[in-house]
Amino acid sequence: MKMGPTPQPAIAPASKASSLYRAFGLTIESDVPLPELTTAPAGSVPDIRIIYSRDLPLPSREEGVITQFRTDGTHFLAWPDVAAFQFHGPDLIEIQPYPDTPVTYLPFPLLGPIMALALHMRGYITLHASAIDLDGHGVIFVGDKLAGKSTTAAAFLRAGHRLLTDDLLAIRANPDGALEILPAYGQLKLAEEAADAMQLAEAQPLPLVYPGFSKRQHRLMGDFRHDLLQPERLYVLDRVGDQPGLTRLAGTQALSAILRYSYITRFGKAALSPADEARHMQGCAALARCIQVATLHVPHALNRLEETVELVRSDCEDHR
């Protein structure tokens, strides 16, 4: 692990070009344009500020990805040819892009690993997941790469249900201790084959993040709703066979599934101090206790996803 820079004590205010956004239950003030997000009302007090910097070191391509996690929350991360990021606790993030980096590249890390780390620092449970609102049920889809989380979520959108998030899921406990999903923003990453199969009428395909990228972002048209929802189901996607099916997971199996797909573990053990690790385990255990967890067997054929939608609907109805 490489060392990041020494944090500077004086932080410049956000620029006049900054904008206010709403996502994950927070108001975000950002110098970087984030058109994926809902615009927040003028005068909103930001919970997180993202500001441009001119003083962060930019590692060479040969140095590779750099991560430095500090117990005081002044983490430093850098992706060669994209940008460097300096945390000042969970509320302030400096960013310095590499020369000639298109500004359209920057939301990709900002709304993925950088936001995941900021949310984790706030004590939220973060999962690498998609989630939808199924008639008042918070339904979560996790799985390995290419398991079809976004494609499965798109099938539910096509059936008339609401997207809560794609890729990064944040859950927090409210003052009464109940867990709540914090909706993110209305965008899905879909491979061309999946997009052709889903034919989402109210989704606008966007240019590829960069040439050769395997998935295209699809921005949902209309207003994105930010009302909170309690998580009730978590399905581990398993693309196998010809028939949709469910296998219940309970106890340590359910907890293991949640831990496996928690976002913060993608950073490795270095991102978790002993106290963080204990808090992370407690949060995942609380989630495992309050929801139903199952493996969802999804047929390979995209034209059979409607059967998966009906199976999940029936599962939710049976346990109301």
Image: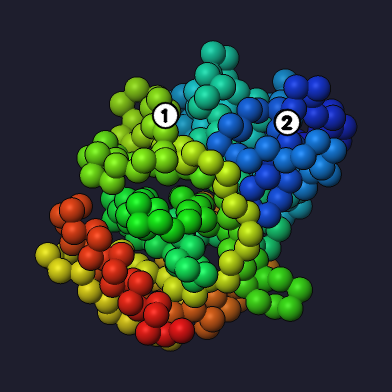
Under mark 2, the amino acid is: Ser
Residue identified by numbered label 1 = 206
Figure quadrant of residue 192: top left
Residue 38: image location, x then y, percent:
63, 40
- Please name the residue shown 23% across and 44% down the image: 197
Does residue 106 appear left or right of residue 241 in this picture?
A: right
Figure quadrant of residue 229: bottom right
- Helix, strand or loop at label 2? It is strand
- Please name the residue shown 49% across and 39% down the image: 221
Figure quadrant of residue 18: top right
Q: Which of 272 and 242 is in front in this view?
A: 242
Residue identified by numbered label 2 = 19
Under mark 1, the amino acid is: Leu
Residue 130: image location, x then y, percent:
44, 56
State which quarter of the image contains the N terminus: top right
Other residues around mark 2 within 10 Å, as few (<14) / some (14–19) / many (≥20): many
